[in-house]
Amino acid sequence: MKKVSYLPILASLVILGACNNKKDAEESNESFSSANPFFKASELAFQAPAFDKIKTGDFKPALEEGMKQQMDEIQKIADQTEAPSFENIILAIEKSGQLLNRTSMVFNLLTGANTNPELQKVKEEEAPKLTANTDAIYLNTKLFNRVETLYKKKDQLKLDAESLRLLESYYQKFELAGAKLSDADKDKLKELNKEEATLGAKFTAQLQAAGKGLKNTTQQPELQSMADRAKREELFNKSWNRAEKGDANDTRKIISRIAQIRSAQAALLGFKNYAAWKLQNQMAKTPEAVEDFFSKVIPAATAKAKSEAADIQAVIDQQKGGFKLAPWDWDYYAEQVRKAKFDLDENEVKPYFELNKVLINGVFYAATQLYGITFKERKDLPVYQEDVRVFDVIDKDGKQLGLFYCDYYKRDNKDGGAWMDNLVPQSKLFGTIPVIYNVCNFTKPEAGKPALISFDDVTTMFHEFGHGLHGLFANQQYPSLSGTSVARDYVEFPSQFNEHWASDPKILKNYALHYQTGAQMPQALLDKIKKASSFNQGYIFTEALAAADLDMQWHTISPGSPLEDVDKFEAEALKKTNLNLSYVPPRYRSSYFLHIWSNGYAAGYYAYSWTSMLENDAFSWFQENGGLTRANGQRFRDMILSKGNTEDLGKMFFNFRGHNPDIKPMLKKRGLL
Ligand SMILES: [Zn+2]
């Protein structure tokens, strides 16, 4: 996952333990001064955040002062009397808000990966103000008039391609944000935006409280090994109903209101629903294109899931279970089917996937083979938690390309799932190189024991590092077009593409080494992993499509619809698109679907499947052209990974692949053809 960092809603808290003494926090809450670590850009290498100096109490004053400074800057840009030029409008906007940006980036990381109640409170308080701040920029009539004047004569400006793209992208942002609305409608939109932001932050806080001890997906890893059916059912229901208990953390009222707010926002902007509005600047462009994509893949996915269910039911019957397959049985019996059909036991595999070896000899090694970059751990930079590691990333010519932070272990004060983001964006304008981080949720081993992870976890590491490469190879003038600042239905393309290298024979041989003996994984086991890669794909694809489809249906409700009954809406939505297989629940239920209610993936969860089409098609180009080679890697780096959002994304893909995205390589990879 890639957190959408331009969102005004910021993810979750910082524990800065000992250095956070109460007196300091109180003082720094009062005012913003040069003593605040965000006062100027960090003086550490590559502006790495000074985590050893940052205190929880520093965020509120820095965010508030940051918003104030940006407002002053924006007002000056709007009030100018000279004729609008690229420099005095677009470039000036791009340069505004530096204090806010550098504070938000650290705030985003800590509220998501290492939260505490105080920081959470700041987030809830600041979320609506940050939204109002963004609104004040994009709904500023005077400013928009100047942008529009400039936009209308864009062809006479003789701008370079990237600058032209920046102008076009700002114009579209203003337009989609409602800059053309009447003042009365702008006020209505601002109110709706503010309420949405407040509810989104509240949703996150409630879900964090409701989901303690649970993985944020419907299925829980423990189910795979639970022999007691009643206990399985109990755990499943705990997960399924986590946010539907009718208590203070029940999220249903919030989400039905958010859906209603979003349809009202779209109506104000003149769109028939929220998805139609939000897809304007995406690769897919319309909800119809997404629905068409769904209609092509749902039959293949559900047919495969049904045949997998039949295999599982056969095992249940063979064992005289005397019951019909339910969702809480799936993983337990699927594991037995996997053992029987593929003779592959997770416990046999895990000793070969020791986290550190996977990182150094796998994830990093693959990047060296493909792109010529190398990595060196450094211990001199402060981190926000003792398990976090930092690496220098060195380019093929010996130049520093960026910094890479990784935080792999699950903690109670961390959001579920895995994600990547920047702490410092790459930009030639500001002379900055990328500072990138990956956050995951792997089980931390006991002291002195190795972290042995599953092949799924291995894949997650390659995935998040794929986002990392997209950020690290960024080579843009402007930060807002840099690296992973691309459409949601494109951003998961480089990350999912990078997953392929986890099972490349050359890479596997290098990292899949027994943690005790150092022996390579036996060929027979490698073959089994490869063979088993199509295992359970019907289930996996169907649960993802069910979630994506729920998202799309929540965001295509008509403006003026009453508040929906969440459970009824969900059941009917899944039935309508034939995704209501009783034994394949959606990967995220509406009531705990963090992606869409507060993490920037509203009307965008389809992006994972859409980009799966892109990455499999791109990988088939590699297969047709010699696979893992430096030359192929360089071509991918030059044509995709280093380009950020400087070109039309469909065109970028076409140029690399030589044709528009084809669905077949994805279906083939998943064993659905
Ligand atoms: Zn991702």
Image: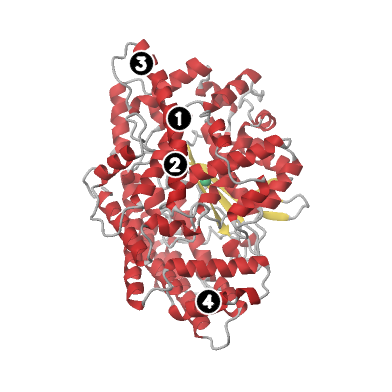
Cα distance between the residues tagged 4 and 3: 65 Å
Crowding at dot 2, Cα within 10 Å, few <14 / some 14-19 / many 20+, comes out as: some
Q: Is mark 4 within 8 Å of ligand 1?
A: no
Task: Classify 390 as above or below 148.
Answer: above
The answer to whether one can see residue 639 in this image is yes
How are the residues colored?
secondary structure
Whether label 2 touches label 3, CB < 8 Å: no
Cα distance between the residues tagged 1 and 2: 14 Å
What's the amino acid at mark 3? Ile
Task: Classify 580 as above or below 633.
Answer: above
Foreground residue, 325 or 108? 325
Residue farthest to the right?
Answer: 397
Identify which residue is drawn at 35% across, 20% down.
Answer: 227
Counting residues from the start of the chain, the first of labels 1 and 2 encountered is 2
Residue under label 4, please give it: 147
Residue under label 1, please give it: 538
Task: Classify 112 as above or below 93.
Answer: above
Kind of element beneath mark 4: helix
Residue under label 3, please give it: 316
What's the amino acid at mark 4? Val
What's the amino acid at mark 1? Gly
Disc on res. 294: 2
Cα distance between the residues tagged 2 and 3: 32 Å
Cα distance between the residues tagged 4 and 2: 38 Å
In front: label 4 or label 3: 4
Disc on res. 132: none
Residue farthest to the bottom?
Answer: 81
